Amino acid sequence: MERLLNQFVQLLQTFNCQPTFPITSVVLQRNPRLIQDLARKGVEFAIHGYTHVDYSALPYDEQRGHLLQATRIFADHRIAFKGFRAPYLRWNTDTIQSVREQAFFYDNSQALWWNVPLCTDTAFYRRALAFYHAQPADQYPSLPWMEDGLVRMPYALPDDEALVERLHCDALQMTEVWLSILQQVHQLDELFVLGLHPERFHFCQEALTATLSQARIMQPAIWFGRLDEIAAWWQARLQTTVSISPQKDSFEVRVEGPAGVTVLARAVSLSAPQEAWWGSYRRVRALSFTVYSAVRPWIGVSSRSAKELVTFLRQQGYIVEIGDESAAYTVYFDQPVFDAQHQRLVLRQIEEARFPLLRLGRWPNGSRGALAITGDIDALTWWDYGARILGR
């Protein structure tokens, strides 16, 4: 496994990409030298439980105890951590509460399955989706979201385990699946968390290389990031302030945010230089400028609309104002009821339209979409494999 891990990391480094490896803490405790060496090379390690067990089957106190032990082991071996991924992608509200209490920054346990051309759509695979409580990507956006201070990010399926063990895909078929997800992510400006367990690196190396090669040449560029970097960006961008000063038939706009924050404009007349970005969107090459418009080219939301709608829109980078004058905005929502099942529909209503719109980009430096390469480590030696079977 040490050789496979190093080969995995070396391949990614040729694409200026660093992975996130969630690892069970007992495996770190048995193999600290290798993990410390990889961490020095820029690999991020997240916590994959104390042992590799189904956390959703454990009572709250036991889950909390597991995570407390896990964080202590990471600290004892001086391995930084910010994130958590549940073993088997199995979690419940107690899991998330325990993660939040242990001061994790992000969680990557929610499974999201993509509608892609499969070599064989087996009942075995469908049972796995049900076991993971996976959500369909055609109904739920593949995007981070803030939940009571915790950044949550979806994990993409099919991953290597599904492709090799459940769908019996060959290298060409795996490549087709991952390239299809990548294309959809780029089209939608979303996030692809690609999962590849290191023990299957050789089985999936060709598909991974093809995916990275394609991602590297896409325009606008896809951002390659570790999960901690993606979570940090998502939180930092949410702190961006957009100051708007109305003038006669114009607005003075000033944007203050993290380095890399991007302003996008669709069918909006501005004083600042712009360049083509995607579709009818143009990238604004300034953070302070004048908008020439009699109406506000951003989103208005009625005072009776759901607070969850306002939160969701702002997390996407949309500029949102709450008011009851619908005619003052180029797009306006009056939606008292909003939950996660409405998210994809609202995004389509905004992004597939042509009305003038000024907004922030989701990703840094004008990127369109983000790609994270990850792989769970729950065993590094034969002893680890045997202990895992025994739940140790």
Image (tube, helix red, strand yellow):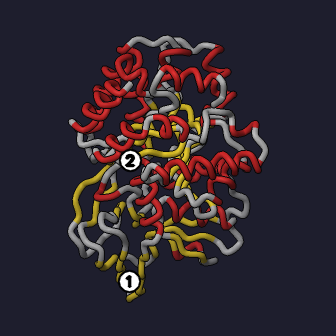
Q: Residue furthest right?
A: 59
Three-letter residue code for mark 2: Arg
Identify the disc placed on residue 226: 2
Q: Secondary structure at mark 1?
A: loop
So how many labels did they put on this image? Answer: 2
Residue at left offset 54%, top offset 62%: 313
Residue at left offset 30%, top offset 63%: 260
Residue 137 higher or lower than 226, as above or below:
above
Q: In the rendered image, which residue does mark 1 sit on?
A: 249
In this view of the protein, which residue sits in the foreground, 387 or 185?
Answer: 387
Q: Which quadrant of the rendered structure holds the C terminus?
A: top right
Q: Which quadrant of the rendered structure holds the N terminus?
A: top left
Residue 52 higher or lower than 360, as above or below:
above
Q: What is the x, y in percent for residue 175?
A: 36, 21
In this view of the protein, which residue sits in the foreground, 140 or 336?
Answer: 140
Residue at left offset 48%, top offset 16%: 164
Residue at left offset 45%, top offset 62%: 317
In this view of the protein, which residue sits in the foreground, 234 or 87?
Answer: 87
